[in-house]
Image: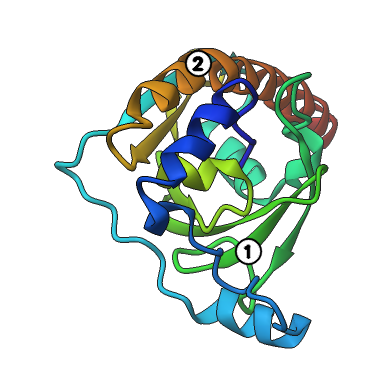
Amino acid sequence: MPRIATPAVTLLSLACGVFLSACATPVGYASGTSVTERDTLHRSTPAPTVEPEAPFIAHTVETDIAAPPEVLLHWLVNVPLERILLGTEKLAGIERTDVLSASWGSPGARRRVVLRDGNTSLEELLVVEEGRRFQYVVWNFTNEARRAVQYAVGEFRFAPTATGTHLTWTYRFRGNGWPTQGILKDFVEEDFAAYMKVGIGHIQKESTLDLTARRD
C-alpha cells in the first residue's frame, strides 16, 4: 500500500490527535514483538469485513491485453508484485511479498506486502472467479495511510474481447471519516490515480512479454 505524501502528512498527523484509534500501532509491530510473534499475528488477525453499503473513495483504470481472460487472470494473481507495481516519484513501489498462508492464489490466502521504503500492509484474497474477476482486501498499514484508511479493496475484472481481454482495475478506500476524508479523496484522485496508471501500464507490458512468449 503506497504512502500518503506530504503535505497531507502534516494534516493527517494533526488529525491523529483527534482520532487516536485510527493511528494505533499496527498489529504485529508493538515494541518488543519478535519476528515470530509478528508473523503469527499477521497470520491470525482477522481481515476487515468489507461493508457493501459503506462510503468508499474509488479509482478505476482500464486497458486491453492480447491474452484470454482465464490465462490473464491466472498470470495476474500469481505474478510477483515487484514486477508490476514499481511505484512513482511520490509513492513507493513494492519490494517483495511474504506469503503467510500455506500457498497463494485461492480465497483466504494471505501475504504481507513490503514496500521499498520498508513499510508494510497485509493482503488477503477474497474472491477468485476464473476468467471473470478476483478481489482482495488490504489493511494493517504501517505508514501514514493508516491515519486516513481503515482498509482498501482492490478488484480486477476480465472481459473477453475479439483480441483478448479488456482488463479493469478498481481500488476502493474505506476512509476514517472526518477530518481526513477530504485528504484521502485528493490522494486517491491524484497520487494514487497516477500510481495505478503506471501500474496497469506495467501489467500490460509484462503480461504481454510472458504470455506471448508462452504462446510462441
Disc 1 is placed on an element classified as strand
* Residue 104 picture quarter: bottom right
> Going by the image, does 81 lie left or right of 2?
right
Which is more toward the observer, 155 or 205? 155
Amino acid type for the residue under numbered disc 1: Arg
**Mark 1 vs mark 2, CA separation in Å:** 25 Å
Q: Position of residue 32 (x, y in %)?
A: 72, 83
Tell me which numbered mark, 1 or 2, is placed earlier along the sequence.
Answer: 2
Q: Position of residue 118 (x, y in %)?
A: 80, 51
Amino acid type for the residue under numbered disc 2: Glu
Q: Position of residue 10 (x, y in %)?
A: 57, 29
Which callout, 1 or 2, points to the residue nearer the camera?
A: 1
Disc 2 is placed on an element classified as strand
* Quarter the N terminus occupies: top right
* Quarter the C terminus occupies: top right
Which is more toward the observer, 145 or 66? 145
Q: Against 189, is 91 above or below?
A: below
Q: Which residue is mark 1?
A: 111
Q: Which residue is mark 2?
A: 62
Disc 2 crowd rating (10 Å Cα; few below 14, some 14-19, many 20+) is some
Q: Position of residue 53 (x, y in %)?
A: 14, 42
Residue 178 seen from this side: yes
